[in-house]
Image: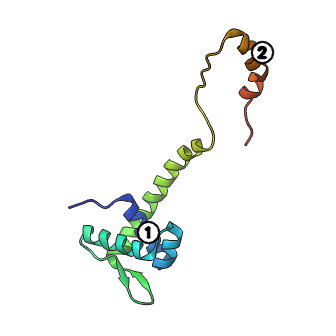
Amino acid sequence: MHKPSLAEMSAFVAVAERSSFAKAARQLGISPSTLSETIRGLERKLGVRLLNRTTRSVGLTQVGERLLARLRPRLDSFQAAVEPSMRFATKPSGQLRLTVPRPAARTLIAPILGRFLAPTRM
C-alpha cells in the first residue's frame, strides 16, 4: 500500500475548507478533474471515503472531519517551517569569494566594498 503524499493531503484540505472542487482547483492552480482524481486516489490509498459528493455540494464524512482537524495544524506548522527558507530565493546570502589581482582589488573592488557590505533595509 502506498502512503498518501503531502500534495494529496494539501489537496484534500483545500477541497474540505472550500466545500468545492472548482474553488480548490483554482486555488491550487490545477483543473477540477485533476483534483477530483487526486482525491479519489487519496481515498483509495486510505481505504475510506473522505468527502460526500453530490452534483451541487461537497461535504466531509466523519472520517474526513477528523482527518481535516488533525491535518490543518500540521500543514500550518509545515508552512511556517518552510516560509523562512523561501526568503533566500529572493535575497542572496552567504559568503562571496573573489579572486582578483591586487591592483584590480584596489581600484575596482575597494571603492564599492563599503556599499556592498552595508546592511540592507527591508
Please report the residue visible at 77 percent of the width from the left and 15 percent of the height from the top.
107
How many tags in the picture?
2
Q: Which residue has dot 2 on it?
A: 107
**Residue 13 bears which disc, if any?**
1
Q: Nearer the viewer, residue 4 or 111?
A: 111
Q: Is residue 16 above or below residue 90?
A: below
Q: Are marks 2 and 1 in contact (CB under 8 Å)?
A: no
Left or right position of 7 against 40: right
Indicate the position of residue 64 as horizontal and vertical percent values.
Answer: 36, 74
Name of the residue lying farthest toward the top: 102
Q: Nearer the viewer, residue 115 or 84?
A: 115
Please report the residue visible at 72 percent of the width from the left and 14 percent of the height from the top.
104
Q: Is residue 89 above or below residue 1?
A: above
Name of the residue lying farthest toward the left: 1
Image quadrant in which the N terminus is located: bottom left
Indicate the position of residue 89 as horizontal and vertical percent values.
Answer: 58, 44
Indicate the position of residue 87 as horizontal and vertical percent values.
Answer: 59, 45
- Callout 1: SS: helix
Please report the residue visible at 46 percent of the width from the left and 53 percent of the height from the top.
78
Q: Nearer the viewer, residue 62 or 54?
A: 54
